[in-house]
Amino acid sequence: MRRRSVINAALVAVLAVALAACGEGGDRTTAAAGSGGGDRSIVIGTKDFTEQYILGELYAQALEARGYEVELRRDIGSTEVIDKAFTSGQIDMYPEYTGVIVAVLAGASEMPTSEDDAYDAARAFEESRGATMLERTPFADKDAIATRREFAAEHGLRSIADLVDVPSVAIGGRPEFRTRRQGLRGLQEVYGLDNVTFRQIRGGRAYEALDAGDIQAASVFTTDPALATENYTVLEDPEGLFGFQNVAPVVRRAKLDALGEEFAEIVNAVSAELTIDAMVTMNAAVDVEGQDAATVAAGFLAEQGLLG
């Protein structure tokens, strides 16, 4: 998928989202034409970063185009926060990363060794508490540790394990990185990095902090647009600390049963088109080019024939 084709398709589809779109961080409700409400209504939530805003729009707009009434609640928060919203019934569905479910929510001490195993383990956990997961995406957005390319070259860094030989490393990340096993705790326990100190960085500011020299390493996502440049090095994770992170929508079982097979087919059709190239391009369109997530999502859906 070329970025220009996404942008052009977005212009064609912009009328489709004129009623639905609002700025990131806000909620919206759209009663689509032909919606009967009730068992054709759903509340979708997202976490608090660009990729999640886009994912929320993709699923919401595809469903709206087929007559579902969707309330989209964006910017809810981290995994721990959005999971509470989900389990308390405030939202019916949200896009989650399979490895995050296994490590953070299920609290597994060992990570699965394949994408399929991660999905199966995550789904089993969700089904144990009255929910389930729809099909996973082809793309995986893994947590990773990145440094400036010059810093990696200076210290001969290829993997996370190599950081043990650096006298002192300040690593930046979101607040939850401090306590997660897939974070500072895991770096210390799995890689023995007692030389690492944590600095809290607001979402989206990691690369700015790296460029300014405020930190030497950062917790990043492998679909970040900045990684398409030659400025940064993503360190290998030989111990598999960060696992496998395909996206799969988590949905309450009762809601899925009420909505029926058509609902699942629509959501699964969207997920099936989400390749790594597609997500990197859409993330870049929002973060680098400054486009609205709703418009970018509409363009992609139109290009894939998923708006009707």
Image: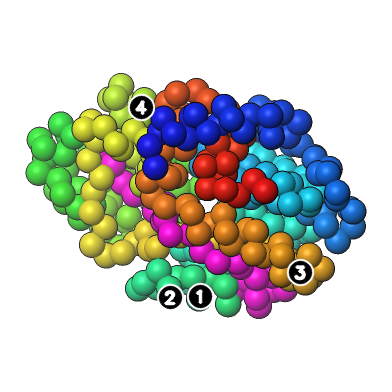
Residues shaded magenta: 125-147
Q: Within 10 Å of the Cα at label 4, are there few (<14), some (14-19), or many (20+) other Cα atoms?
A: some
- Identify the element where label 4 is drawn: helix
What residue sits right under mark 1 in the picture? Answer: 121
Disc assigned to residue 117: 2
x, y percent for residue 290: 50, 23
Residue sitting at x 55%, y 36%? 299
Q: Within 10 Å of the Cα at label 1, are there few (<14), some (14-19), or many (20+) other Cα atoms?
A: many
Closest to the camera, between mark 3 and mark 2, is 3
In the rendered structure, which disc, 3 or 4, sits on the residue that comes first in sequence? 4
Closest to the camera, between mark 3 and mark 1, is 3
What residue sits right under mark 4 in the picture? Answer: 209
Callouts 3 and 4 close, C-beta under 8 Å: no
Cα distance in 3D space between marks 3 and 1: 24 Å
Cα distance in 3D space between marks 4 and 1: 35 Å
Callouts 1 and 2 close, C-beta under 8 Å: yes
The amino acid pointed to by label 4 is Ala
Residue 146 visible within the image: yes
The image quadrant of residue 26 is top right
What residue sits right under mark 3 in the picture? Answer: 260
x, y percent for residue 251: 68, 63
